[in-house]
Amino acid sequence: MERQGEEVGRKFTFPSALTVLAVVTVAVWALAFVVPSGTYRRTPAGDPIQGTYHRAAAPGDFVHRLGQLFLAPVNGLYGVRDAATGQVAPDAAGTLYGSAGVFLFVLAIGAFITVVFATGALDSGIERLAHRLRTRGALLIAGVMTVFSLLGTVEGFAEETLGFYGLLVPLMLALGYDRMVATGVIILGAGVGVLASTVNPFATGVASSAAGVSLGDGIGLRFAMWLVLTAVTIAYVVRYAHRVRTRPDRSLVGFLPGDRELAAAAEEPPSLTGLQKAVLVLVALVFLFMIFSVIPWAGALTGRADATPYGWELDWSFAQLAALFLVAAVLVGLVARLGEQRLSSLVVQGAGDFISPALTIVLARGITVIMNNARITDTVLHAVESAVAGTAAAAFAVMVFVVNLPLAFLIPSSSGHATLAMPILAPLADFAGVSRAVVVTAWSAASGWMNLWVPTTAVVVGGVSLAKVGYDRYLRFVWPLLAVLAVVICGFVAFGAMAT
């Protein structure tokens, strides 16, 4: 018995994103003593000018550098960049360099989502949709996957899907499908939406902020990609489902004892109440208004990036969006009649539940502060400047997608990954003559593609466990789709790069 306990104790568990970023922080700090320091001359907007890199000594001695490591998380939250020296410090005078705005935005989103789920409206709405389509298998698969994908692309719907296995597994079994079909509907449905994040605040939102572009920049390309990739993914799952129903022996996972009895026990969910319907309408309006508020309409409708904004454009950023979702959380609570005490506790709970992704943003930003203050960020840019400058726009966009794949494996948190990678990738886009919005899209696609299958995400490992299908079986099921999605993604980002 003791040996078994020791074996279990030795089992490797991949560290969390926070731990990975803490290790990377120390590693980057140490490397800063080895990597030569230097800087570019910059435009008034702060963008590096190609070909102007020159060596420049980093300020401070070892004790000063040690203080930079100690203050990295603080600088990552509210560090201020001095306009004269370019150094970032919490007590400096200049422009905010830390991620305080994005940090608060993530907490506001957490409060809103928690309040919405507390009403039961979203869960019940999906359950009713599934039940109404229960006799039409292909339509059921397409309908549920479309809803999951839509939620994924607008608000990063992922971990929330874990609650739907108890509903969809027996429902799919009742229709003659296997457990893999239910797994594909849930993981791939939401996952492909997150992959093609149009306005997902935890992916595209954070990446856009780190890249210095509007959340609405590039939304046309991302929307087209979302439509195509969602259709491809639905077709793939429907094709497998049809094969399993006509030839059960071709199932990748087979059928467990009692599957048929479990399916027969599925009951009709209760009808939506008037309050739940009102909540669903309000949630839809909030996200529609968010999309409206961030799109640069003049540029989108005229095709000119320098077009004069229309008078009715809002041009909202994270400060306004954070306020929007805090107000929306209160409105949802009032409409659902949650009461003052419960609503207040849910807002606090929601912010607390989302503190982890918010902290990953802060830690990742702290790493960029260390690189900035040690003056090695520009050295890294210079190291690849010549290669990027001679690269075709399409090839550069594909390269951004490929380079971010291993980073997404190490840092499964999309928020932390974006904050860490974008300060390097965005200026590279300028050198390559590619829109920063295309880089954001390529990065988002890489992060989402990896999170469809990597064992470092709870959505995948938790999902296959709840569905009772082996992870190895899931990989066998999903790898042909992953190959197709990768090719389509590369085509989209290449096209987007050439069109800019």
Image: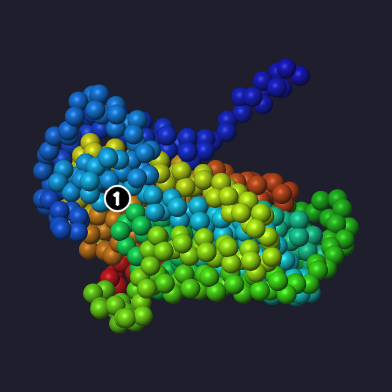
Q: Amino acid at mark 1?
A: Leu
- Give the image location of residue 263, x and y in percent: 84, 60
In the picture shown, does residue 87 fall above or below 336?
Answer: above
The one nearer the camera, 396 or 205, is: 205
The one nearer the camera, 86 or 326, is: 326
Q: Indicate the quadrant where residue 161 lies.
A: bottom right
Give the residue drawn at x 23%, y 24%: 62
Q: Indicate the quadrant where residue 488 lies.
A: bottom left
Left or right of 162 in this view: 111: left
Label 1 Cα neighbours within 10 Å, binned few <14 / some 14-19 / many ≥20: some
Split into 4 quadrants, where in the image is the N terminus? top right
Q: Label 1: state its secondary structure.
A: strand
Left or right of 411 in this view: 458: right
Q: What colour scheme does the image use?
A: rainbow
Residue extending farthest to the front is 340
Give the residue drawn at x 10%, y 43%: 54
- Give the image location of residue 136, x and y in percent: 75, 75
Give the residue drawn at x 62%, y 74%: 281
- Give the image location of residue 391, x and y in percent: 23, 58
The one nearer the camera, 482 or 161, is: 161
Total label count?
Answer: 1
Residue pointed to by mark 1: 96
* Any part of residue 178 in sight: no
Split into 4 quadrants, where in the image is the C terminus? bottom left
Give the residue drawn at x 48%, y 73%: 289
- Give the image location of residue 109, x and y in percent: 52, 57
* Any part of residue 71 in sight: yes
Left or right of 28 in this view: 229: right
Q: Indicate the quadrant where residue 35 lies.
A: top left
The one nearer the camera, 202 or 93, is: 93
Left or right of 449 in this view: 85: left
Residue extending farthest to the top is 2
